[in-house]
Amino acid sequence: MTRLPSIRGKHERGFALVAAIFIVVVLAMLGIMMVTIGGMERATASAAVQGTRAFYAARSGVEWGTFGALNNTVPTCGATPSTPTTNTFNLAAAGLNGFTVSVVCSYTTHRERSDTYNVYVISSTATSGNFGDADYVSRTLQVTVTNAP
C-alpha cells in the first residue's frame, strides 16, 4: 500500500522562511534603534562637556574682572561710575581654548562716614562657535563685589 503525501504538509511549506524573515527584520530594527540611541547619548554628553567648559571660561572672565577691579591693576572698569566698560579676549589655556570671553564691568561709588567704597557689577559671557550652529555654546555669569573691608 502506497501512502499519498499529506495535503496539510503541502500548504505549510515555506512557513519557516516567513518566520526567519520576521525575526531578521525585528533584530535589524532593534539594531538601528540601539545605534540611534547611542548617537544621541554621545551628542548629549558632548553638549554637556561644552557647557561645562563654557561655564569655566565665563568664570575665568569673572575672576579676571574681579581681580582687576579690586586691585586697580588692569583697566577692568571705566574711569567714571555707572559707565560700563567691555573687555574681550580669547582664551588659549588647555581645555578652554576656542572660547571668546566678554567682560562687562560697571561700578557705583558709595560713601559711609569718611570712607568711600566702590560696588562693582561684573558680567562675563563666554561663547564658542556661531549662533545657530549645532556646536554653539554660551554661558553668562554675573557677580557683585565691593572694595569695602
Image (cartoon, rainbow, N blue to C red):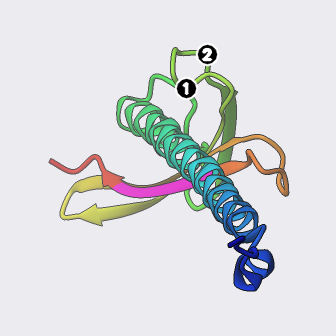
- Amino acid tagged 1: Leu
For the point 35% across and 37% down, which residue is it?
A: 70
Above or below, comparing residue 60 to residue 37 in the picture: above
Report the number of discs.
2
- Looking at the picture, how far across and down is residue 90, in whole percent? 68, 25
Left/right placement of residue 131 relative to residue 81 reads right
- Amino acid tagged 2: Ala
For the point 52% across and 36% down, which residue is it?
A: 57
Please name whichever residue, 105 or 51, is drawn nearer the observer in this view of the structure. Answer: 51
What is the magenta range? 138-144
* Residue where numbered disc 1 is placed: 96
Q: Is residue 106 visible?
A: no
Quarter placement of the N terminus: bottom right
Residue at the far front in the pictured view: 1
Return the mark for residue 83.
none
- Looking at the picture, how far across and down is residue 101, in whole percent? 63, 37
Q: Distance between the residues labelled 2 and 1?
A: 6 Å
Left/right placement of residue 57 relative to residue 118 reads right
* Residue where numbered disc 2 is placed: 92
Residue 7, quarter of picture? bottom right
Dot 2: what SS?
Answer: loop
- Looking at the picture, how far across and down is residue 138, in whole percent? 64, 51
For the point 66% across and 32% down, which residue is it?
A: 99
Please name whichever residue, 95 or 148, is drawn nearer the observer in this view of the structure. Answer: 95
CB under 8 Å between discs 2 and 1: yes
